[in-house]
Image: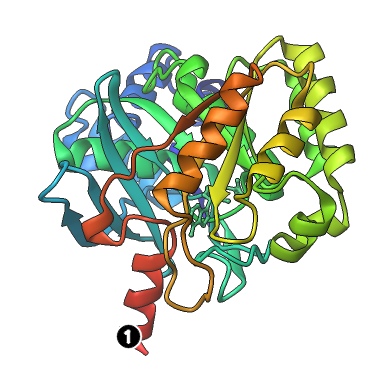
Amino acid sequence: MKRDLRGMTLPEVAEALKTMGQPAFRAKQLYTWLHKGAGYEDMTNIPKTLREALTTEYDLYRPTPVRRQESARDGTIKYLWQLADGNCVETVLMRYHYGNTVCISSEVGCRMGCAFCASTIGGLVRRLEPHEMLDEVLFTQLDSGLEISHIVLMGIGEPLDNFDKVMRFLELVNSPEGMNISMRHISLSTCGLVPKIDALAERKLQLTLSVSLHAPNDEIRNRIMPVNQAYDVETLLSACRRYYAATSRRISFEYAMIDGVNDSADNAKELLRRLKGLPAHVNLIPLNRVEESPLVPSTKAAVERFQKILEDGGVSATVRRTLGGDIDASCGQLRRKYTQQKG
Ligand code: SAH
């Protein structure tokens, strides 16, 4: 299998070109083209002989959008991208007042098994390569014509279960000669793989860590998130405290509100106690219904009560506005429907 050129860092591209006998300035030239999504035919200031040599040495795949759905309500666009091996992943472009945000997938499928999530139903097919994640951002920007300023790793897959490749993707997308997206504009969401949270803390990146907590205690979390059997709530929150100590970055907790499961006033009070002393923000997300699951979203009143208890107790909490409700924008649903149709 050939290496994909877009997955290489600038120093790697420079090294490769050097061994091909090229002058040093070519590396930046080529890297800039690659990160604009260009194909060889576009690279007019690069000698044809070199382009031909690159074609034989490296892959340069550009994903194709097999589905594109735009919300009539809020302009959210959902893409289903087909990768080189025929697998598909979802990317969602959301338009917020602070900038266009792309929600990308990090794996084809997922092996974490959360009870409420559509992405995990078929299990993990494979992990994404760094350039495939970069391509989600790049080609969503090119196709939509909308400049992307923010990235959330909250699509299909568990990014910390694909740690090294996600780290390389971050390096690529953050590079000044590439898309140059600031770490402060990137959020990474995890279901709570504790050793990987510690590994991430060591890198001291300025990104925002989002932790999918969804429950105030082990009894409830064990029921909806199998990962809790490996790393329970206290173990997870301890890792979050270490993460904060290492990075000084406030942690964001995701909390999907599920009717009768995790949304009582007592649940809110318990969550408040457990988050005490940890600089945190809680994102309350009304559960998105998933066809295959019996779980249903909390009522508006329950969500508001929950939020008020947290806020009154001094923990900042927002209710996430749902975008793209009319286009199956919650993760995994579009890919699932598409693969089912194809049989
Ligand atoms: N694997 C990572 C990131 C992918 S999911 C993680 O677990 O954090 C992004 C967020 O959407 C997570 O907080 C996840 O728990 C949540 N989520 C998944 N299915 C959902 C649903 N049906 N309704 C609301 N939130 C959901």
Residue 3 drawn at (x, y percent): 53, 49
Q: Residue at x 18, y 30 (%)?
A: 146
Q: Is residue 310 visible?
A: yes
What is the crowding at mark 1: few (fewer than 14 residues within 10 Å), some, or many (at least 20)? few
Residue lying at the far left of the rendered structure: 72
| 31 and 133: which is toward the camera | 133
What residue did someone put label 1 on?
342
- The relative height of residue 199 versus residue 287 in the rendered view (above or below) is above
Q: Is residue 153 visible?
A: no
Q: In screen coordinates, is 304 left or right of 323?
A: right
- Quadrant assignment for the C terminus: bottom left
- Please, what secondary structure does the residue beneath circle 1 have? helix
| 211 and 293: which is toward the camera | 293
Residue 247 drawn at (x, y percent): 73, 13
Q: In screen coordinates, is 233 left or right of 6?
A: right
Q: Residue at x 39, y 67 (%)?
A: 333
- The relative height of residue 318 versus residue 165 in the rendered view (above or below) is above
Q: Quadrant of residue 243?
A: top right
Residue 170 drawn at (x, y percent): 54, 29
Q: Quadrant of residue 277?
A: top right
Residue type, mark 1 in image = Lys
Q: Residue at x 83, y 43 (%)?
A: 233
Q: Residue at x 45, y 15 (%)?
A: 182
